[in-house]
Amino acid sequence: MQYVHLGRSGVIVSRLCLGTMNFGLHTDEPSSFRIMDRALEVGINFFDTANVYGGKRGDGLTEQIIGRWFAQGGGRRDKVVLATKVYGRMGDWPNQSKLSALHITRACEESLRRLRTDYIDLYQMHHVDRDTPWDEVWQAMERLVRDGKVIYVGSSNFAGWHLAQAQETARSRRFLGLVSEQSLYNLTQRMIELEVIPACEAYGIGLIPWSPLAGGLLAGSLRAARVGRRADEELRKKADTHRARLEAYEKLCADLGEQPADVAIAWLLHQKAVTAPIIGPRTLDQLNGSVQALNLKLSAETLGRLDEIFPGPGGPAPEAYAW
């Protein structure tokens, strides 16, 4: 396993992050336990979850599964850099969503209870809250850090200017602020190269891409259809929309002798701003397959070909659209 600092922080995380969104929803608890045990065996120490994962609103089922896995002992909790999230709606009453100081404080306590832990290593804002002032957000986060309930703070789905707002307000309060941003980023979705990635690089914020396989689109979706494997209707429609590019992509992967999913993850690992792509295996086989991407070195020629098949926005702003 390869390891790297999480942004400018001193904490060290694996270059792959285990996403747990499928736990309890598509993957049963015993299988989820086996996946987490295997992740530790291969050296993955970075686990990502959220209080809204698991299906039924307010249950936090995925966090509960992770908590029961921690409760088995064996040093599981101490080996994991644990990330969870706050923002999503956890009930029908007011103040059960978003980033008010009230909701942040209550949601953290509930996540700690479900996860059966005393502290959260990385507490991430799942989305920006345009209705709550940054001073209020940071006041709540500072209190959690001061009380030892949260170690680091991260964000998810922020625009570049949101990152700047957050960091400058944190700076004025003499607070560390964000150490990570979790963004949608893959070969088919490169919009964050305009402003999010430059902001991350300027502020020392680690980038944690989610959906590295574009919901399965980059995992050999055309080949899977040809050999008769099942694919959901939404994925089929997306594959048809991107058919020309996917045909070129899957041919390139075949010429390289590599699995399309491995190439997609390897491409992210070659982007200098990226800390750790989030892999979300439903099965042990999927987890074992994702680890192979760590050993895949893409040549400059291959990276150039991938840029031709899946062109980005043209680099950072404003040069991407102006002189």
Image (tube, rainbow, N blue to C red):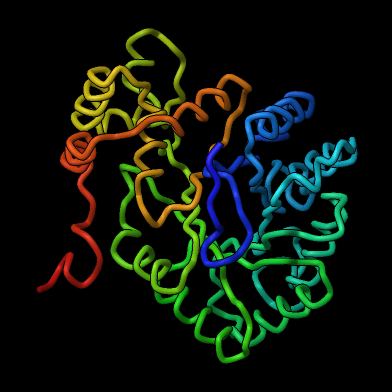
Q: Quadrant of the N terminus?
A: top right
Q: Residue at x 53, y 51 (%)?
A: 4
- Left or right of 44 in this view: 116: right
Q: Quadrant of the C terminus?
A: bottom left
Q: Is residue 254 above or below residue 148?
A: above
Q: Residue at x 77, y 48 (%)?
A: 60
Image location of residue 268, percent across then percent down: 38, 44
Question: Please, which residue is most extreme toward the top here?
Answer: 227
Q: Is residue 184 above or below residue 323?
A: above
Image location of residue 130, percent across then percent down: 53, 77
Please state which of residues 230 and 140 is positioned toward the viewer in this rendering.
Answer: 140
Q: Residue at x 58, y 30 (%)?
A: 281
- Left or right of 202 in this view: 278: right
Q: Residue at x 39, y 67 (%)?
A: 201
Please state which of residues 60 and 182 is positioned toward the viewer in this rendering.
Answer: 182
Q: Is residue 10 above or below residue 220?
A: below
Question: Based on the displayed image, in which of its 4 quarters is residue 137 positioned?
Answer: bottom right
Image location of residue 307, percent across then percent down: 20, 43
Q: Is residue 275 above or below residue 248?
A: below
**What count of labels does the image hold?**
0
Question: Please, which residue is most extreme toward the left here?
Answer: 323
Image location of residue 293, percent across then percent down: 44, 31
